Amino acid sequence: MMTATRGDSAGAFANRLSATMQLVTFVLGEEEYAIEVSHVCEIVRVRPTTAIPHSPPFVKGLVNLRNLVVPVIDLRLKLGLEDIPVTKGSRLVVVQLEDRTAGLIVDSVTGVVRFCEEEVLPIPPTVAEESIHYMRGILKKDDAFIILLDVNRLLETRELVGCE
């Protein structure tokens, strides 16, 4: 936790604090991804879903979480990755943005990390537009990268027709 030090003005401390992001990190395949903690409601084991006719392939169905009907999105399929069966380590990351809620199936959750906004690297312009649509940026962690996803784009309602 960040604390004010002698000589810090209240404004300078607030600016440092607001520039820090807390991110939930998770794995899909061999890569690590992240979303902002502020969008995460809970993380639970993957449960059986009720299928929705005529829904996109990445929408696995609906689940009931404490009397809330939540669409379940297979994040692997949504991002164009290989479809694999759910395992014991798979998790459902329940995210919310304004009035939209969804459960994202991920291979495993790895933890919570802190980064400064300034550490978010831009996506190289040579990356295909389809690949970067859901990406907000890239974070460097040791010798690897974490792909920061844009929850707003992940929950675009035009792609979730029939699920809300």
Image (cartoon, rainbow, N blue to C red):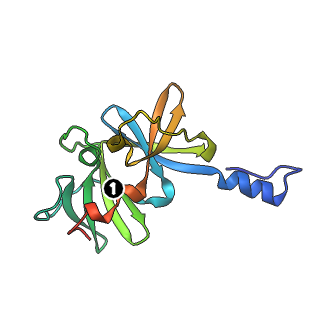
Instruction: Identify the image quadrant of the C terminus.
Output: bottom left
Nearer-the-camera pick, 55 or 123: 123
Residue sitting nearer the eye, 155 or 10: 155
Q: State the image coordinates of residue 145 (x, y, percent, origin top left).
A: 47, 32
Residue 50: x %, y % from top left: 15, 64
Q: In the image, 148: left or right of 57?
A: right
Residue 102 seen from this side: yes
Q: Residue at x 32, y 62 (%)?
A: 102
Where residue 33 sits, quadrant-wise, is top left
In this view, which residue lies farthest toward the bottom? 67
Q: In this view, does 67 lie above or below 46?
A: below
8 or 150: nearer the viewer = 150
Residue 15, percent across and down?
72, 55
Name the residue located 40 percent from the left edge and 37 percent from the top edge. Answer: 32
Identify the element where label 1 is drawn: strand
What is the tally of numbered marks visible in this picture? 1
The answer to whether any part of residue 43 appears in the image is: no
